[in-house]
Image (cartoon, grey):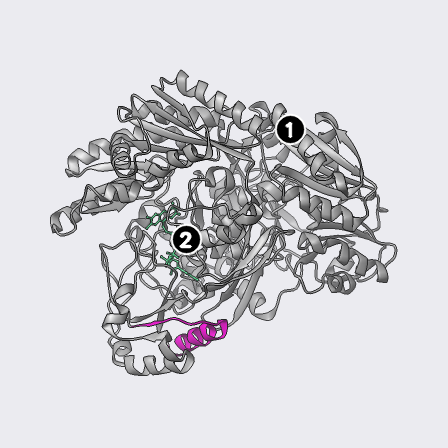
């Protein structure tokens, strides 16, 4: 993984930059010693690490604004960071850039049940939002598996999903507004407690922009009332193909479950050894289907899902009988990544997304690739929306294995694009998939995206080295080439 | 008379834009032209008519996705989906009659460009939430794409959100992929009769804050309506629960069955409850739901003749005002108060729309950012220049 070369002029000015930051954020909010910066040297894509120039942890919007204005004026790069759980290297530091941590923005500012929303600071954890409102029977729907740790600001930047986004949508479908600081230090508000934008949907653009456009300093999220009941169904199948078929059949029947997750045999084995959820160890493919709503509806749908599964040859059909059992069914799924972590020194988690109808062939082809690359792959994923999470098992201390894992990962993502899917469904491009962007996009597509970046950050100072394989200067991108004296095209109908 | 250019496919579309760029010709971009009266009046050199680039490209009901060309009539899309018992969950309104045109006109892409949404906006989102991907031409005459056909996709910026609601000012689309959902088996409506506006909004907010999955909440004078959709036993159970929940509102209750409900919510969707005279000025306000009644009350102090009804649990207010040279824009926007929201002038004579901001003016920093965003797609301002003013 190549990162852009460090700018020696910036490195030489480090002392000045630290002093300038200290003038903005007093006390312990500026960390410039190696020991203190160590916890920030990587995110959850831990195979890649780099020390930042300096870490700054502002506490107020005015400080964030002053920092960005200083960076803009002095052409210093900035990497925003929430909780550092990005799986794509989105919050990995850059050696000649300030790491701007939002951990101190950790307050819930307002809860408005009547309008069903909460205004929170970006450093509040995803689960923290739900915790703040659950005593009133409400919750925040997007639930990434990292929800205990990841921040709402990070969720906005990555447009994170979770097991329930099949029915309730991703982060982008559950936001009402944000406050945003631009590189100029200007503070703008997008949205609020009302729906939709008065102009361009910049809230939609900011969501999933991976920290490349601005720093989010406040978020207004939509709250939902907890469903009256939820039950989970555990379905075991003799083949992966049968499990994947069942996923498509459930959706085709007009049922949108709250969640529909799949685990392959190895994932089931790991999860079972780790938490003992009572999964059937003989199944080649396991589905966990959650249905929620009023009890009569849930009972009715559980029945129908079970029927569909039996029709596809399910060998295990178990329905959770109480809340405790439902939670247990999920416990294995939720702990699947760490569980797989027990059987391998390292793993790489991919995130391609494919049309549901292509799941069967994608899984089969992945097995073939696994043989070719001589690395094991374990699958635990959001089957309902076709979002794969192949885990490639390897040992990062073996350079050849790391290289093979990277190649295997790239092959899987190319496969996803080839069958009509995309490189990433919820984890973001970051540095991990940056160099594969050309597989999905043409140069024109990417130039258009970069021009949008230029509208927010004309000097490419925010989160450099991420998302785009090659950054082109905004002045160059902005040039318009006009060919005069061309004849209007004669064959297009005009009247 | 401005002339019209009518490309037949994506390649001709690209050539047409390239030609306009070279010639410095501004383009009035149209599907079927059903929303010509919406937005700031424009004075373009040429009409770019997309109705020739039409047709369904791919419909995969089990994938919940339909891909179609930009000029495809909404009517055709809805008919196609209905055959497989699916729908556009964002419930795009047919604003034809409101704008003094025929019903049943317009293209799906036109609705997406206005980010339109009906009563189900509350629970299912707007057009923005259903546009999965597109291809089109930017103001440099380049064909580009964004997004895809899959449900989950965070690869690159989410340009679909940006294009939805851009009123054709950023790029000209030739093809879109849109998410579709199963249509509900049953639709029933609980009516609360005789509540005043404040009590109605309280009841609607309570209903939406309940676990009963309300998918429409509108208040018309004297009548508050809550919609429930789904399989029969579920709708039945939720209806009962909702009656109990709202018993202490003191309102008399009534119900609409599936067929009556469909008619009722279609009318709400299409703004039919405004019985305003054809020359009345129509505004749409988006606000925090609980603010709705206070906004209307402030307005009534200054314009006693105002007629209003509420959708989105109070968060969407449709207003009819007597005709005036400035559409009372300062009064309407002044009534919004400090809790946020925006007002859009949805119907007024051309001269009035030319004289006042149709869309809510933005603070300077945001307006400057929006202008840079426009330039990043359309540097020579060829597409629908000024329409979003
Ligand atoms: C075990 C595990 C399980 C996971 N499961 C899921 C899952 O189920 N679904 C899912 O979608 N993701 C999942 N993730 C990925 C990750 O948790 C999410 O991407 C999360 O949203 C990142 O949040 P964060 O606060 O850690 O952000 P960080 O990692 O700190 O940052 C992520 C990106 O956001 C930017 N950023 C952060 N804060 C701001 C801000 N305030 N303003 C502007 N930019 C900002 C950063 O620059 C960076 O580009 C998982 C990760 C782990 C480790």
Residue A418's x, y, as percent?
32, 37
Identify the residue at image location x=64%, y=43%: B208
Q: Secondary structure at mark 1?
A: helix
How many labels sit on residues? 2
Magenta stretch: give its range: A54-74
Question: As displayed, is residue A458 above or below residue B374?
Answer: below
Q: Are marks 2 and 1 in contact (CB under 8 Å)?
A: no
Task: Find out if the beta carbon at label 1 lies less than 8 Å from the nearest ligand 1 atom.
Answer: no
Q: Is A30 displayed left or right of B52 in the figure?
A: left
Task: Find out if the beta carbon at label 2 lies less than 8 Å from the nearest ligand 1 atom.
Answer: yes
**Residue farthest right in this picture:** B304
| Residue nearer the viewer, A113 or B75 | A113
Residue B247's x, y, as percent?
75, 38
Q: Dividing the picture into quarters, in which one does residue A468 lie? A: bottom left
For disc 2, the neighbor class at 10 Å (few under 14, some 14 to 19, many from 20) is many
Tag shown at residue A219: none
- Give the residue pinned by disc 1: B237
Identify the residue at image location x=46%, y=54%: A128
Tag shown at residue A158: 2
Residue B116's x, y, as percent?
63, 45
Q: Main secondary structure of the magenta part?
A: helix
A165 falls in the magenta region: no
Q: Is A189 displayed left or right of B2 in the figure?
A: left
Q: Chain of mark 1?
A: B
| Residue nearer the viewer, A423 or A447 | A423
Q: Dividing the picture into quarters, in which one does residue A493 lie? A: top right
Question: As displayed, is residue B260 above or below residue B222?
Answer: above
Q: CA distance from mark 2 to mark 1?
A: 38 Å
């Amino acid at each position: 993984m190549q990162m852009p070369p460090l700018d020696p002029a910036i490195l030489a000015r480090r002392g000045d930059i630290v002093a300038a930051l200290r003038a903005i954020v007093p006390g312990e909010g500026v960390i410039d010693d190696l020991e203190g910066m160590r916890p920030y040297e990587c995110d959850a894509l831990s195979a890649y690490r780099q020390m930042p120039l300096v870490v700054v942890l502002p506490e107020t919007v005015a400080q964030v604004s002053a920092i960005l204005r200083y960076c803009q004026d002095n052409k210093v790069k900035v990497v925003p960071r929430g909780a550092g759980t990005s799986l794509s290297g989105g919050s990995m530091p850059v050696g000649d850039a300030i790491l701007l941590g939002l951990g101190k923005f950790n307050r819930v500012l307002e809860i408005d049940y009547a309008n069903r929303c909460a205004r929170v600071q970006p450093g509040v954890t995803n689960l923290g939002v739900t915790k703040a409102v659950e005593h009133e029977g409400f919750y925040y729907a997007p639930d990434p598996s990292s929800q205990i740790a990841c921040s709402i600001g990070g969720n906005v930047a990555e447009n994170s999903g979770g097991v329930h986004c099949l029915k309730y949508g991703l982060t982008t479908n559950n936001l009402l507004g944000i406050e945003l600081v631009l590189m100029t230090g200007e503070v703008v508000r997008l949205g609020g407690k009302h729906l939709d934008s008065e102009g361009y949907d910049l809230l939609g653009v900011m969501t999933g922009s991976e920290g490349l456009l601005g720093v989010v300093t406040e978020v207004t999220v939509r709250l939902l009332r907890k469903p009256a009941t939820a039950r989970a169904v555990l379905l075991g199948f003799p083949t992966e193909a049968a499990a994947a078929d069942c996923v498509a059949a459930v959706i085709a029947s007009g049922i949108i479950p709250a969640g529909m997750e799949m685990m392959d045999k190895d994932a089931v084995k790991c999860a079972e050894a780790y938490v003992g959820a009572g999964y059937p160890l003989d199944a080649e493919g396991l589905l966990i289907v959650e249905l929620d709503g009023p009890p009569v509806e849930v009972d009715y749908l559980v029945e129908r899902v079970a029927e569909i599964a039996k029709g596809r040859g399910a060998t295990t059909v178990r329905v959770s009988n109480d809340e405790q059992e439902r939670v247990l069914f999920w416990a294995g799924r939720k702990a699947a990544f760490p569980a797989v972590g027990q059987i391998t020194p390292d793993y790489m988690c991919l995130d391609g997304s494919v049309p549901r109808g292509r799941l069967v062939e994608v899984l089969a082809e992945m097995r073939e690739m696994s043989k070719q690359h001589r690395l094991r792959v374990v699958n635990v994923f959001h089957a309902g929306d076709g979002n794969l999470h192949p885990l490639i098992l390897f040992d990062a201390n073996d350079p050849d294995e790391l290289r093979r894992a990277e190649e295997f990962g790239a092959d899987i993502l190319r496969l996803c694009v080839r069958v009509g899917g995309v490189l990433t469904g919820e984890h973001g491009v970051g540095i991990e998939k940056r160099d594969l962007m050309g597989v999905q996009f043409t140069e024109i597509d990417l130039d258009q995206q970069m021009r949008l970046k230029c509208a927010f950050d004309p000097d490419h100072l925010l989160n450099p080295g991420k998302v785009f394989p090659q950054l082109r200067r905004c002045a160059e991108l902005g040039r318009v080439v006009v060919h005069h004296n061309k004849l209007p095209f004669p064959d297009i109908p005009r009247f | 008379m401005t002339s019209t250019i009518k490309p037949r496919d994506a390649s001709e579309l690209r050539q047409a834009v390239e030609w306009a760029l070279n010639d410095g010709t501004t383009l009035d971009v149209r599907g079927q032209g059903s929303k010509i009266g919406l937005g700031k009046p424009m004075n373009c050199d040429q009409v770019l008519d997309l109705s020739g680039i039409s047709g369904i490209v791919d419909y995969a009901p089990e994938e919940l996705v339909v891909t179609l060309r930009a000029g495809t009539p909404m009517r055709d899309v809805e008919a196609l989906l209905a055959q497989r018992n699916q729908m556009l969950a964002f419930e795009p309104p047919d604003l034809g009659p409101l704008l003094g045109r025929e019903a049943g006109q317009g293209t799906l892409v036109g609705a997406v460009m206005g980010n339109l949404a009906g009563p189900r906006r509350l629970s299912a989102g707007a057009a923005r939430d259903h546009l999965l991907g597109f291809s089109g031409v930017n103001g440099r005459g380049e064909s580009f794409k964004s997004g895809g056909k899959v449900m989950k996709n965070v690869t690159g910026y989410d340009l679909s959100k940006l294009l939805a609601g851009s009123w054709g000012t950023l790029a000209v689309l030739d093809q879109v992929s849109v998410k579709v959902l199963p249509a509900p088996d049953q639709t029933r409506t609980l009516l609360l009769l005789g509540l005043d506006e404040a009590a109605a909004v309280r009841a609607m907010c309570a209903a939406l804050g309940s676990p009963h999955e309300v998918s429409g909440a509108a208040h018309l004078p004297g009548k508050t309506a809550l919609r429930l959709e789904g399989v029969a036993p579920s709708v039945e159970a939720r209806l009962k629960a909702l009656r109990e929940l709202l018993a202490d509102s003191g309102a008399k209750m009534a119900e609409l069955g599936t067929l009556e409900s469909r008619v009722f919510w279609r009318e709400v969707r299409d703004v039919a409850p405004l019985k305003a005279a054809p020359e009345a000025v129509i505004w749409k306000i988006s606000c925090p739901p609980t603010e709705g009644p206070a906004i209307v009350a402030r307005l009534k102090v200054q314009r006693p003749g105002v007629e209003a009804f509420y959708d989105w649990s109070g968060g969407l207010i449709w207003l009819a005002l007597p005709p005036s040279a400035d559409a009372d824009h300062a009064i309407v926007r002044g009534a919004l108060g400090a809790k946020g929201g925006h007002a859009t002038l949805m119907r007024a004579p051309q001269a009035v729309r030319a004289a006042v901001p149709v869309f809510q003016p933005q603070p300077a920093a945001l307006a400057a950012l929006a202008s840079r965003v426009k330039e990043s797609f359309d540097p020579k301002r060829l597409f629908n220049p000024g329409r979003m003013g």
